[in-house]
């Protein structure tokens, strides 16, 4: 094998942008931390959450690359992705989708010895929703929020996986966290999509930037992040243990999101990747940290 040819494992990790798993993980773990605070930590539950999250996201991302391979080949920004560039074949990626989807379904069985069948009951509808996102931009400009609701499955799924039968009487906490994630992700995906405004319009794809233009799209992204902050401000109502540490952290998150929106302007998208990745990773892990500290010290 030539020295500069990436291995299959490296190519697959690059295909699914494995590092972007960090967007969903902090909120899933924050939800899990609050749930464990109510009934005690269970190591097997942690294993199940990590396995299911990793498998579900990998399947969804790989399927997205399969569904978009012809579009990616036409877009100069994405033409060097693994399938259009010939680094991975359609057959290999298809098998990867099948195996990771199966891994997600089997991962839900980890919770059965804990007496919780709900993850298994919900796994197929969740998987269909995750995979369905890949076709959303072909018929709706609300695809950004479809993606947001897909990642919102992480905190709600973690809550269901831990709390089991008790979920029906305590929907406020996972609902707040899940809808906060939906608006957070929807907002930063709109920012990211501004890079493809002209291409999406020419290709007949639906996105908020292609419909509203970059200036209005960035305004809607900012509004989405304001909604996220308002939702997170409701968490102390649902979970009274959230106190001064949490409020301080939420204030820091508001500052970070404000900074994110100073990085990108219509006609100046050079810092989109900084806004998209590093700022949002800091937001996610920062919230996980302050919720953990609040539960530990508060």
Image (cartoon, rainbow, N blue to C red):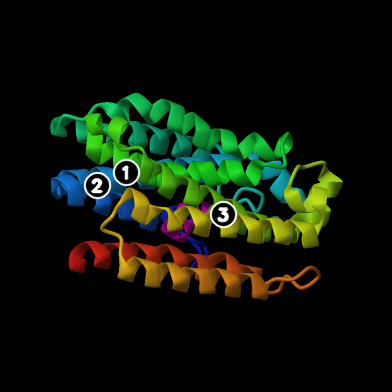
Q: Position of residue 106 (x, y in %)?
A: 29, 32
Residue 81 visible: no
Secondary structure beneath label 3: helix
Left-right relation of 127 to 296:
right
> Which numbered dot is residue 158?
1
The magenta region covers 12-23
Residue at 55% across, 48% down: 88
Residue positioned most to the top = 121
Q: Position of residue 197 (x, y in %)?
A: 79, 55
Left-right relation of 265 to 184:
right
Residue 121 visible: yes
Label 1–label 2 contact, CB within 8 A = yes
Residue at 81% across, 48% down: 211
Pair 1/2: label in front: 2
Secondary structure beneath label 1: helix
Q: Position of residue 91 (x, y in %)?
A: 54, 36
Q: Please state which of residues 258 and 79 is positioned toward the viewer in this rendering.
A: 258
Q: CA gap, disc 3 to disc 2?
A: 24 Å
Residue positioned most to the right = 202
Give the class, few, some or many, for how many residues have Cα within 10 Å of label 1's Cα (few <14, many ≥20): many
């Amino acid at each position: 094998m030539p020295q500069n040819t990436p291995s299959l494992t490296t190519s697959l990790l690059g295909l699914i942008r494995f590092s972007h798993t960090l967007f969903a993980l902090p909120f899933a773990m924050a939800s899990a931390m609050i749930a464990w605070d109510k009934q005690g930590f269970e190591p097997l539950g942690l294993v199940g959450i990590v396995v299911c999250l990793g498998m579900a996201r990998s399947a969804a991302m790989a399927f997205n690359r399969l569904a978009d391979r012809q579009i990616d080949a036409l877009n100069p920004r994405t033409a060097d992705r693994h399938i259009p560039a010939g680094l991975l074949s359609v057959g290999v990626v298809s098998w990867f989708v099948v195996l990771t989807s199966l891994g997600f379904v089997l991962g839900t069985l980890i919770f059965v010895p804990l007496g919780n069948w709900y993850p298994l009951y919900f796994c197929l509808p969740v998987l269909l929703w995750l995979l369905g996102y890949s076709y959303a931009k072909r018929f709706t400009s609300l695809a950004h929020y479809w993606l947001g609701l897909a990642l919102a499955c992480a905190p709600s799924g973690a809550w269901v996986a831990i709390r089991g039968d008790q979920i029906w009487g305590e929907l406020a906490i996972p609902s707040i966290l899940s809808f906060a994630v939906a608006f957070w992700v929807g907002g930063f995906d709109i920012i990211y999509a501004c890079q493809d405004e002209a291409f999406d319009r020419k290709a007949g794809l639906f996105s908020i930037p292609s419909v509203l233009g970059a200036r209005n799209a960035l305004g809607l992204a900012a509004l989405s992040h304001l909604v996220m902050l308002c939702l997170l401000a409701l968490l102390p109502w649902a979970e009274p243990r959230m106190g001064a540490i949490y409020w301080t952290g939420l204030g820091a998150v508001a500052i970070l999101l404000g900074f994110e929106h100073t990085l990108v302007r219509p006609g100046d998208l050079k810092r989109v990747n900084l806004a998209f990745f590093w700022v949002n990773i800091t937001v996610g892990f920062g919230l996980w940290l302050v919720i953990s500290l609040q539960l530990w010290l508060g």
